[in-house]
Image: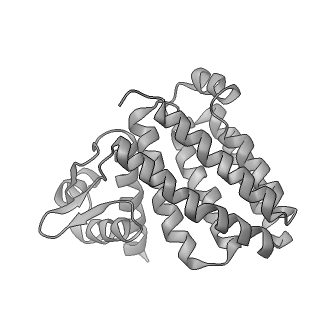
């Protein structure tokens, strides 16, 4: 049980280090360095890195270890083309398979996102992941989970390194929420469409969600 706890600590610590720019895109994530930083043995760190690779959050090259994925304009466009393929069918299935047992968890995540915008913007990526994981769970197709989790983490990397709306500049984030940062409202609308068992509306909302994020990121200078 303790080993599992240490794996989770290491798993989350690596993600936090990436968010904090301790590891840049394309840079190696070295097992021994992580273990030293966390003051734990290499065994749970090794397991955590394997899990991160398995989840698609880190890349692995034979004989070269783990790396933070590289970022580029070409990759950004490919990523969002992929999201257009995979996410609308997922939310359609979620709407068709929806049960009221999920409503409490949906509402709790929307409330958590709202609190995080005010108090802890640096953790918004965690809530975003929970929201899309729940949609994949409702859809009831396990193949969605890994693909969408990987695509959203890659999207978060672009936001971490090419925009500052996940930093603790709270006032700037609030202003952006009123303008270009539309995710919280879109998440709420998406959950409502799924709960209404309206697959067409859910698919339209997620397409708009993907488009607005793509435009938001594409507008930077590459």
103, 82: nearer the viewer: 82
Which residue is at 24% across, 65% downward? 60
Which residue is at 44% across, 47% downward? 77
Residue 95: percent from left, percent from top: 78, 68
Which residue is at 47% across, 46% downward? 156
166, 42: nearer the viewer: 166
Position of residue 122 relative to residue 3, above or below, is above
Residue 96: percent from left, percent from top: 79, 73
Residue 169: percent from left, percent from top: 53, 24
Q: Which quadrant would residue 56 be assigned to in this image?
A: bottom left
Left or right for 158, reference 138:
left
Q: Is residue 41 visible?
A: no
Position of residue 72 relative to residue 45, above or below, is above
Left or right for 194, reference 2:
right
Q: Which quadrant would residue 45 be assigned to in this image?
A: bottom left
Position of residue 168 relative to residue 52, above or below, is above
Quarter holding the C terminus? top left
């Amino acid at each position: 049980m303790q080993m599992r706890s240490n794996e989770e600590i290491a798993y989350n610590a690596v993600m936090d280090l990436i968010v904090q720019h301790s590891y840049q895109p394309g840079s190696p994530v070295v097992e021994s360095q992580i273990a030293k930083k966390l003051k734990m043995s290499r065994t749970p760190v090794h397991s955590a890195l394997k899990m991160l690779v398995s989840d698609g959050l880190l890349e692995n090259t034979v004989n070269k270890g783990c790396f933070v994925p590289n970022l580029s304009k070409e990759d950004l466009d490919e990523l969002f083309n992929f999201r257009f393929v995979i996410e609308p069918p997922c939310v359609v299935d979620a709407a068709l398979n929806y049960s009221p047992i999920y409503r409490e968890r949906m509402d709790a995540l929307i409330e958590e996102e709202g609190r995080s915008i005010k108090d802890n913007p640096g953790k918004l990526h965690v809530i975003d992941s929970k929201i899309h994981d729940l949609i994949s769970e409702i859809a009831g197709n396990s193949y969605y989970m890994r693909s969408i989790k990987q695509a959203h983490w890659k999207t978060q990397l672009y936001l971490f390194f090419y925009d500052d709306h996940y930093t603790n500049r709270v006032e700037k984030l609030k202003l952006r929420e009123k303008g270009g940062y539309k995710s919280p409202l879109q998440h709420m609308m998406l959950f409502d469409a799924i709960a209404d068992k309206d697959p067409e509306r859910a698919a339209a909302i997620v397409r708009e969600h993907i488009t607005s994020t793509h435009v938001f990121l594409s507008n930077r200078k590459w």
